[in-house]
Image: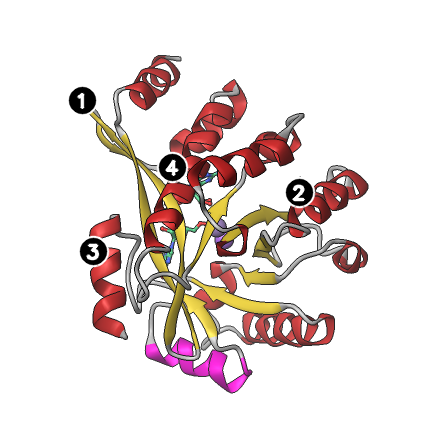
Amino acid sequence: AALEEDMRAGLAKGEFELYYQPQVDHGRIVGAEALLRWHHPQRGFVSPSVFIPMAEDSGQILPLGQWVLEQACLTLAQWACDPQLAELVLAVNVSPRQFRQAGFVQQVLATLASTGAAPRRLKLELTEGLLLHDVNESATRMTELKSYGVGFSLDDFGTGYSSLSYLKRLPLDQLKIDQSFVRDVLTDPNDASIVRTIVALGASLGLQVMAEGVETVAQQEFLARQHCYAWQGYLLSRPVPAEPFVALVRGHA
Ligand code: G
Ligand code: G
Ligand code: MN
Ligand code: NA
């Protein structure tokens, strides 16, 4: 409860910050995933794996998620002024409660409009559990946002229900292979099979497949042999604040 109170106050006091982890396709940085960080004045750095579930339970995820969306869109609007950054796509994690709240679509559209961010540069990362809660309602919300150009990625793919019939009913753009499969892809034949299967599934459904948690050149080369050229992971960079991220893009070009 104390930490929940601190979250509410911390948002007002500017203790939260967006970090950016580069996403690569065919060797070029094509965008980033925005990842929330909390610098607590007494506890120091608090991990999102601790405070996001708490925020989801308490409902604090609604203002927090809205803050993330707004920061991400402000960042996109800034990048749009710089030719080296203007084409980057920013992926934002959306929590179940946030996605399901009444008016979510209007909130995203209003945030895009007020910040001047281009909808095409925004990608929302959703999870299977969130989408399957009510597939028809999910499809309706996604289709509306998609008509403006917003993209959709299915995060942590392979860890959820693996009921595949819903995939073709949802206007997704991308599957993200969960990092648990990438971690042992070179040593665990099951994980290697799962990765191959997801890549083939993406190809046959016309979805881009992105691997996450790539830490070694050998993992990246395995993925490339499966014709998976989109990835993110510590091999290139950990999530970093906006300035070093921009420096990384400029240095990488
Ligand atoms: O960097 P990592 O430790 O950043 O993130 C841990 C978990 O927190 C991941 O599951 C990630 O998706 C989640 N997370 C990070 N930032 C956000 C955010 O802005 N919104 C939501 N809903 N989840 C986030
Ligand atoms: O649940 P989601 O996929 O949004 O969370 C992404 C999480 O993965 C974040 O905590 C992020 O910091 C972490 N992450 C990103 N790249 C790597 C990596 O190469 N290795 C590991 N172990 N974690 C990573
Ligand atoms: Mn994610
Ligand atoms: Na993930």
Depth order, front residue of 197/64: 64
Inter-mark Cα distance, 4 to 3: 21 Å
- Amino acid beneath label 4: Pro
Name the secondary structure under disc 3. Answer: helix
For the point 18% across and 23% down, which residue is it?
Answer: 41
Q: Which mark is residue 42?
A: 1
Mark 2 residue type = Gly
- Answer left or right for 209 relative to 132: left
Q: Does the magenta stretch mainly form a helix, a strand or a loop?
A: helix
Give the crowd class for mark 2: few <14, some 14-19, many >=20 residues within 10 Å: few
Residue designated by label 3? 244
Q: Could you say which disc has been placed on residue 48 in the image?
A: 4
Could you give the CA–CA distance between mark 3 and mark 2, rounded to whole angstroms? 34 Å
Query: Which numbered disc, 1 or 4, marks the residue that appears first in the sequence?
Result: 1
Q: Earlier in the sequence, mark 1 or mark 3?
A: 1
What range is drawn magenta here?
217-227
